């Protein structure tokens, strides 16, 4: 029978406790979520700074719709590049101290669009093993070569760079890793890039807004060459940007197919995003809260659960088997807590985990309740 792989693969997923389903969310903040009429404490939101629903951002969105419309009506190279986009780019350039910035419709598209454009025949992508799917898929789809190095292993990265001396090497890593919450060794990546005439490309999806005095992300740690960050997490809107130098920006405008052949993001969203970045720069308490509550979680959780060391919002509670992780997630649900189980292929076999995200809107009582429910769980 044609397409027999569809049912066969679905059956395999179910048998391995890996079958994925969506949940329709009725309402959600960075602290609470309502699903099927039931309210839960939310520990699965990427709205790390609690900015979704912020009245100033909502007002900017409304103002943006009134001034520029909901839709950009064209790609950036036709007539889709509005004043709102230019103003947002300029805000990001000043914030991150980078000469240029380009907006993309999503982080996935930005990674694909930039990496594919940079993948010429002499290019070699050296990617941290835990890099996001959008980076890996893009790097392995170009005319160039792609190699993965062991997670955060700088000596392996260094020998790969030596091995490919003379090539156009591009080091690719996340700033804060999405499923582990740990950080890349940005200073060493940057130094290796400089020593080997390579480019460093950092995906800051989980560091922007969180790291740095004003939430500048990885650039607050090291002056890496290219930074991609999504607006869909700490920034609380949607879309993404790439910040880089003048030559790379001009190159992407001319050769990045996701940039050239896609409708520019909504100018109203761009306007709201600009308002969000202004709040992020000023409201330090949001970052301080995440740090304070993260320390509480890591010092009170029971010892037999492996916690990956983190300085971000993301706390990976590694349980091991997919089935056991699902059970723990269901147990927490029965206690009114929403934490999604993360299983292979998103993470490696036998490292299934609860990915707990702590946001600026949580409080001490929330963390104590979560910890008590996990510590008392029958596992
Ligand atoms: C590390 C990383 N990069 C890129 C993306 C994609 O960003 P977006 O959701 O804006 O497509 C995500 C997740 O969504 C991510 O976790």
Image: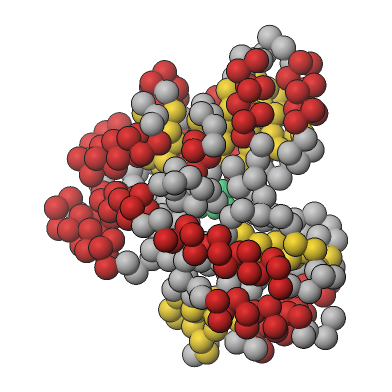
Q: Is residue 118 above or below residue 15?
A: above
Image coordinates of residue 62 in percent, x first then y, are 20, 62
- What's the residue at 45%, 75% (across, down)? 28
Image coordinates of residue 367 in percent, x first then y, are 60, 76
In front of the other: 292 or 72: 292
Q: Quadrant of residue 76?
A: top left
Whether residue 274 sits left or right of residue 363 in the image: it is: left
The furthest residue to the top:
166
Q: Is residue 324 above or below residue 253?
A: below
Report the label total: 0
Instruction: Indicate the quadrant containing the N terminus: top left, top right, bottom left or bottom right.
Output: bottom right
- What's the residue at 56%, 64% (across, down)? 292
- What's the residue at 40%, 56% (across, down)? 284
In front of the other: 262 or 99: 99
Whether residue 187 sits left or right of residue 376 in the image: it is: left
Image coordinates of residue 379 in percent, x first then y, are 85, 81
- What's the residue at 71%, 68% (across, down)? 299
> In the rendered view, how is the structure colored?
secondary structure
In front of the other: 255 or 361: 361
Whether residue 376 sits left or right of residue 142 in the image: it is: right
* Residue 123 is at least partly visible in this image: no
* Residue 244 is at least partly visible in this image: yes
Q: Is residue 187 above or below residue 2?
A: above
Q: Is residue 331 above or below residue 272?
A: below
Image coordinates of residue 20 in percent, x first then y, are 68, 69
């Amino acid at each position: 029978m044609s397409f027999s792989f569809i049912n066969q693969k679905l059956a395999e997923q179910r048998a391995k406790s890996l079958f994925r389903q969506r949940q329709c969310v009725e309402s959600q903040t960075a602290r609470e979520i309502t699903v099927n009429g039931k309210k839960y404490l939310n520990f699965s939101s990427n709205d790390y700074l609690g900015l979704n629903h912020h009245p100033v951002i909502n007002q900017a969105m409304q103002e943006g719709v009134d001034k520029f419309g909901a839709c950009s009506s064209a790609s950036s190279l036709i007539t889709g590049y509005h004043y709102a986009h230019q103003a947002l780019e300029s805000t990001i350039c000043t914030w991150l101290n980078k000469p240029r910035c380009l907006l993309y419709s999503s982080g996935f598209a930005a990674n694909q669009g930039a990496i594919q454009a940079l993948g010429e025949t002499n290019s070699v992508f050296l990617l941290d093993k835990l890099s996001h799917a959008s980076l890996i898929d893009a790097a392995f789809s170009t005319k160039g070569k792609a190699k993965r190095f062991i997670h955060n292993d700088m000596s392996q990265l260094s020998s790969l760079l030596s091995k490919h001396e003379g090539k156009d090497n591009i080091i690719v890593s996340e700033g804060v890793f999405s499923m582990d919450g740990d950080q890349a060794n940005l200073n060493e990546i940057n130094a290796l890039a400089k020593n080997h005439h390579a480019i460093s490309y950092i995906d800051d999806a989980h560091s922007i807004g969180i790291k740095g005095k004003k939430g500048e992300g990885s650039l607050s740690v090291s002056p890496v060459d290219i930074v991609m960050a999504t607006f869909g997490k700490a920034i609380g809107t949607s879309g993404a940007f790439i910040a880089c130098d003048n030559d790379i920006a001009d190159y992407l405008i001319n050769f990045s197919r996701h940039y050239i052949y896609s409708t520019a993001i909504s100018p109203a969203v761009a306007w709201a995003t600009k308002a969000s970045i202004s709040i992020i720069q000023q409201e330090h308490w949001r970052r301080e809260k995440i740090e304070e509550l993260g320390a509480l979680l890591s010092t009170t959780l029971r010892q037999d659960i492996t916690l990956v060391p983190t300085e971000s919002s993301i706390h990976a509670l590694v349980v091991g088997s997919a089935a056991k992780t699902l059970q723990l997630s269901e147990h927490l649900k029965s206690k009114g807590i929403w934490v999604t189980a993360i299983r292979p292929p998103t993470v490696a076999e036998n490292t299934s985990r609860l990915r707990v995200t702590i946001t600026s809107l949580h409080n001490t009582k929330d963390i104590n309740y979560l910890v008590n429910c996990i510590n008392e769980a029958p596992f």
